[in-house]
């Protein structure tokens, strides 16, 4: 199982799920995505287009010797996962998206839903030329992420403070507008959303089913915010294990 993180997290976002999945007998890997690791930090905004990150998914699976695998993604990881699950349906056994809708639904919401446009205004700040947003973020100190332990927030900030790390992470925003990814997902899919997510409007959440043609389940967690894997780790792990158990019989 491959688990993809979002911003401003790293692969350690999934540490509680990795423990639970391993205990259940799964081999689970949560890498730092491109730009978040000093060894995989290409220069240039264009190198952070989602198409490159999607290709990374197949490359990581190849390096692990996985012909077939289950895919999970939160935030930007979910954006990558929606595309990868559609393009690599012959390899992805199941997909779990956390927080971010299918990009077809999300792009539609950005175009037509004032609530989503308001919720996404922060992206315009992140897309400003370097080093404007970098300086602003680094001067503010570790960001308090609702539901995330302070020590984890401090670790994320420490890693993003490394030379070039924050610019690479923000290049994901500079390089992408979420348009142009209408491919439907055919594999068994679980979408875990939440009612108090400040960044994702309900319209995209509820429209996502239109871009999934395979078995599909939406779980909308009441009273939970954006950082679901860390805010309710046991719930997230249970949802994953239930989905994985059902995915085999659905294919």
Image (cartoon, rainbow, N blue to C red):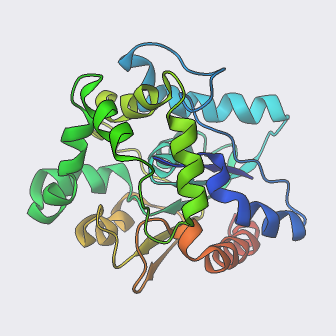
Give x and y (percent) for residue 152.
59, 57
> From the viewer's perspective, is residue 66 above or below residue 213?
above
- Which image quadrant: the C terminus? bottom right
Give x and y (percent) for residue 88.
60, 40
The answer to whether any part of residue 187 appears in the image is no
The answer to whether any part of residue 86 appears in the image is yes
Give x and y (percent) for residue 202.
26, 72
Residue at image coords 31%, 31%: 135
**Which residue of the protein is positioned furthest toward the bottom in this rendering?**
222
**Which residue of the protein is positioned furthest toward the top in this rendering?**
43
Classify residue 203 by image quadrant.
Answer: bottom left
Q: Is residue 170 left or right of 190 when viewed as pictured?
A: left
Give x and y (percent) for residue 205.
33, 68
> From the viewer's perspective, is residue 140 above or below residue 162?
below
Residue at image coords 28%, 64%: 204
Q: Is residue 217 left or right of 68 when viewed as pictured?
A: left
Residue at image coords 58%, 36%: 33
Of residues 183 and 128, the one drawn nearer to the viewer in this rendering: 128
Count of numbered labels shown in the rendering: 0
């Amino acid at each position: 199982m491959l688990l993809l993180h979002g911003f401003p997290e790293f692969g350690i976002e999934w540490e509680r799920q990795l423990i639970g999945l391993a205990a259940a007998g799964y081999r689970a890997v949560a890498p730092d995505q491109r730009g978040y690791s000093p060894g995989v930090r290409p220069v240039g905004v264009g190198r952070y287009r989602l198409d490159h990150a999607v290709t990374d998914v197949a490359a990581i699976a190849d390096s692990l010797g996985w012909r077939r695998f289950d895919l999970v993604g939160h935030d930007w990881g979910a954006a990558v996962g929606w595309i990868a699950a559609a393009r690599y349906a012959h390899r992805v056994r199941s997909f779990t998206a956390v927080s971010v809708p299918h990009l077809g639904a999300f792009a539609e919401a950005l175009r037509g839903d004032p609530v989503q446009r308001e919720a996404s205004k922060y992206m315009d700040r992140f897309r400003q030329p370097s080093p404007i947003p970098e300086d602003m973020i680094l001067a503010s100190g570790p960001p308090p992420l609702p539901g995330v332990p302070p020590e984890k927030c401090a670790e994320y900030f420490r890693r993003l403070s490394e030379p070039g790390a924050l610019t690479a992470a923000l290049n994901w925003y500079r390089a992408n507008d979420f348009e142009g990814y209408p491919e439907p997902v055919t594999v068994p899919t679980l979408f875990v959303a939440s009612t108090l997510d400040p960044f994702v409007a309900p319209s995209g959440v509820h429209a996502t089913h239109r871009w999934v043609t395979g078995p599909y389940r939406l779980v909308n967690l009441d009273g939970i915010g954006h950082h679901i894997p860390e805010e309710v780790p046991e719930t997230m792990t249970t949802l994953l294990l239930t989905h994985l158990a059902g995915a085999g019989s659905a294919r």
